Image (cartoon, rainbow, N blue to C red):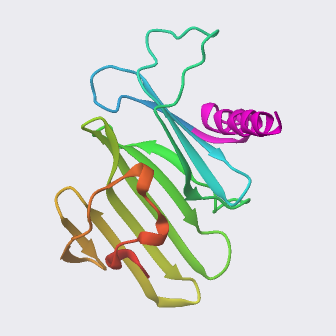
Amino acid sequence: MLRTMVFLIALSAVSTAQAEPDYSRVLDVETFSLENNGDTDRAVLVDNGDSGADLYIYRALEPAFDPAKPPKPALVKKNVAWSGGIWGSRPSLETSAKGSLLVKSENTGIGRDKWTQTLTVVYRNKEFIVAGLTRDAYDSLEPNASHSCDLNFLSGKGKKDGKAVEAKFPVKKLADWSDGDLPKECAF
């Protein structure tokens, strides 16, 4: 009996955490069409209260959904971006001209080591993948200590500090992405 209760409590906690974001902590929302086919997709970025932001992506929300059956996210990516508590350290979402989702994070408001980062997320073969990474960093007290990278993982091409490089970084699913695994061209 005790095992059953513990299992049900754990299952409830997991399903609640995965099913719906805490709407009181929403940082940004972007409505777009991942496949440029007219479907309405939505990305919701939520502060997780632990110096991170979680991403919820909902697919094909049109026609209007039934409020009695809230939509389930097609993807929940925990800690997709770093999130600080003040201006200059809050992540956001945008959509590129080609319909890709851009997950932006930054630290431009605290300390001397400043940085911005953009993950480009696309939907290919029924998977959310990280198609590109743009990262800039600078030391606010040492103007000559700046670096940048702009990598396209799909084409294998990019730039590091303005010079062309080959991006030999494997394409990763968004679910498997971690800032701890930055390609060497962007690890500065």
Q: Is residue 172 left or right of residue 85?
A: left
The residue stretch that appears in magenta = 1-28
In screen coordinates, is 37 left or right of 50?
left
Q: Report the predominant secondary structure element of the magenta stretch.
A: helix
Q: Is residue 27 magenta?
A: yes
Q: What's the residue at 64%, 9% (across, down)?
A: 68
Q: Nearer the viewer, residue 94 or 184?
A: 184
Q: Position of residue 53 (x, y in %)?
A: 61, 51
18 in the magenta segment: yes
Q: Residue at x 44, y 14 (%)?
A: 62
- Vertical comparison of 69 with 81: above or below: above
Q: Which residue is painted at 69% across and 33% down in the image? A: 16
Residue 31 screen position, x and y as percent? 47, 30
Q: Quadrant of residue 141?
A: bottom right
Vertical position of residue 12 compared to residue 159: above or below = above
Q: In the rendered image, which quarter is residue 122 located in? A: top left
Residue 32's spot in the image, x, y percent? 41, 30
The quarter of the rendered structure image containing the C terminus is bottom left
Q: Quadrant of the N terminus?
A: top right
Q: Position of residue 127 (x, y in %)?
A: 32, 40
Q: What is the count of numbered marks?
A: 0
Q: Residue furthest right?
A: 2
Kindly give the residue lying farthest to the front in the view shown. Answer: 1
Identify the image quadrant of residue 128: top left
Of residues 125 and 97, the one nearer the viewer is 125
Residue at image point 60% right, 18% down: 70
